[in-house]
Amino acid sequence: MKKLNSILAVGLMSLACTVEAAPDAHNILISSDQARGGGLPGIVWEIKLASRDGDKVDEPQRLVVKASDDSSVAEVFEPVRSKGSKILQVENNMWLTKPGLSKPIPISPRQRMSGQASNGDIAATNYAGDYDAEMVATESVEGEPCHVLDLKAKHKRATYDKIRYWVSVKRGVGVKAEFQSVSGKLLKTAHFEYKSTIEHDGRRIPFISKMTIRDALIDAETVMEFGSVKVKRVAASEFDLGQMQ
């Protein structure tokens, strides 16, 4: 009997260790958000967008994004005709303002900003706040083992209803995403590169350098390149809707 109890005790301890060691989908999401501007004390970076639809190439754009917590503001510097336009995000709300407008216009993160990039794609990533995550598998993307997460939007202001997200087991960054409708229909795919690094909490962590978004049905894509990344606190006044007016 004592021997049986010992075997049961060892089995229960092993089970407890297994449960404790199991990767947590929400924590994986929090960690991966940092490499795309989320969960940091403040960050400023530049985005260059290049879009094409078949053989048609759109005029490139350049923006500077400032983000802190659940807020971000993106200002357009190129092309010249759009210079001064801004997109402000505060929690789940978003507004557009540009020279000549008397007041900011409420917009949706789901509206297309340029080509395949939605307004929400240019803001700092807060997947952990916007989506419930469930671990569904472990798969390799281009030979790299990844956790596969199914993300479901917590609210209607999220950029996408559903996302299937591949996060590198070793690097802890998102390497691939499939953006889906509420019914699960594939809308767009995205691939991410991390050739930049930032300083945070006394350590260097990877930061996104390129995001390529492709339409699931037609030959169209948008390439977003990220540069001049700086981790720094951003004044709260930068996210004041009244200042935008």
Image (spheres, helix red, strand yellow):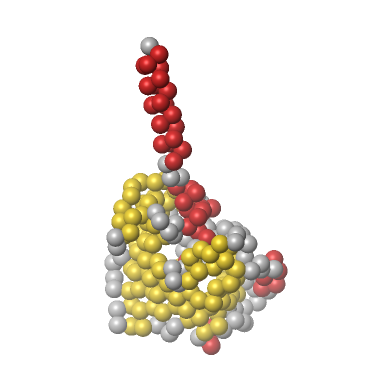
Q: Residue at x 42, y 41 (%)?
A: 22
Query: Relative to 188, does residue 228 appear above or below in the rendering?
Result: below
x and y percentages locating residue 51 in the rendered image:
39, 78
Which image quarter holds the N terminus?
A: top left
x and y percentages locating residue 215 in the rendered image:
33, 68
Residue 70's image quarter?
bottom right
Q: Is residue 242 left or right of residue 209?
A: right
Q: Residue at x 50, y 59 (%)?
A: 33
Q: Is residue 243 left or right of residue 17?
A: right
x and y percentages locating residue 86 in the rendered image:
58, 75
Q: Is residue 142 left or right of residue 159?
A: left
Q: Residue at x 65, y 77 (%)?
A: 102
Q: Is residue 160 visible?
A: no
Q: Is residue 9 visible?
A: yes
Which image quarter holds the C terminus?
A: bottom right
Q: Residue furthest bottom?
A: 80
Residue 185's image quarter?
bottom left
